[in-house]
Image: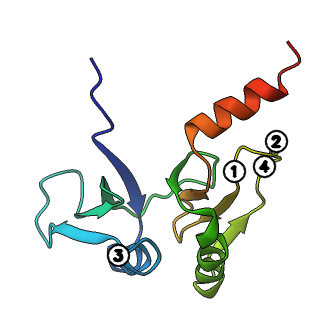
């Protein structure tokens, strides 16, 4: 039986650059740095963001941008704060998808290595309720 999400892993070209981004944008707490050790496939760092374990591994091979992403929950009142922070960091904003009123708002952006992030103001229940109300059946 699945208990929960264990961790999420991102592959990046520059651990230091991504560490700075995670700390500045997400208030990430670094809890592990492999240094020159390689216990896994490559050098890595572990962070806690919003109570979630995030692993970051260094590799020169980065894929193109996709819609694969992780979404962090934010308060509606923090939307502009994060949008301004992302713009200040010169991150590549992605146009949000079309939304049904009531399902929350999102900011989509790519990090330096084409990993897509979403900052979302809604909850799963908000989305389910909105879809149910909007369903023609």
Mark 2 crowdedness (10 Å alpha carbons): few <14, some 14-19, many ≥20: few
Q: Which residue is mark 2?
A: 100
Q: Position of residue 13 (x, y in %)?
A: 41, 69
Res 96 → quadrant: bottom right
The disc, 4 or 3, on the residue closer to the chain's N-terminal end is 3
Nearer the observer, disc 4 or disc 3?
4
Q: In the rendered structure, which disc, 4 or 1, sits on the residue that comes first in sequence?
A: 4
The residues tagged by marks 3 and 1 sit, at their Cα atoms, a distance apart of: 28 Å
Tell me what residue is drawn at x 75 percent, y 45 percent.
102
The percent position of residue 85, horizontal first and vertical second, equals 58, 82
Q: Who is closer to the viewer here, 93 or 77? A: 77
Question: Tag 1 or tag 3, which sits nearer the N-term?
Answer: 3
For residue 129, side relative to residue 15 (left or right): right
Q: Is residue 125 left or right of residue 6?
A: right
Circle 4: element type:
loop
Residues under labels 4 and 3: Cα distance? 28 Å
CB atoms of marks 2 and 4 within 8 Å = no
3 or 1: mark nearer the eye: 1
The residue shown at (57%, 44%) is 123
Is 55 on the left or on the right of 133, as rendered?
left
Q: Which mark is residue 19?
A: 3
Q: Which mark is residue 97?
A: 4
**Marks 3 and 4: in contact by CB < 8 Å?**
no
Residue contact at pointers 2 and 1, CB within 8 angstroms: no
């Amino acid at each position: 039986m699945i208990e929960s999400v264990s961790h999420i892993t991102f592959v990046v070209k520059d651990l230091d650059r991504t560490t700075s981004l995670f700390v500045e944008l997400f208030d990430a707490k670094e809890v592990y740095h492999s240094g020159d050790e390689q216990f896994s496939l490559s050098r890595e760092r572990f962070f806690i963001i919003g109570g979630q374990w995030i692993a970051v591994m260094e590799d020169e091979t980065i894929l193109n941008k996709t819609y694969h992403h992780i979404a962090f929950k934010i308060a509606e009142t923090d939307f502009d704060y994060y949008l301004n922070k992302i713009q200040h960091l010169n991150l590549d904003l992605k146009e949000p998808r079309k939304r049904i009123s009531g399902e929350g708002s999102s900011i989509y952006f790519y990090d330096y290595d084409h990993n897509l992030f979403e900052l979302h103001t809604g909850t799963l229940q908000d989305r389910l309720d909105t879809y149910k109300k909007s369903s023609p059946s």
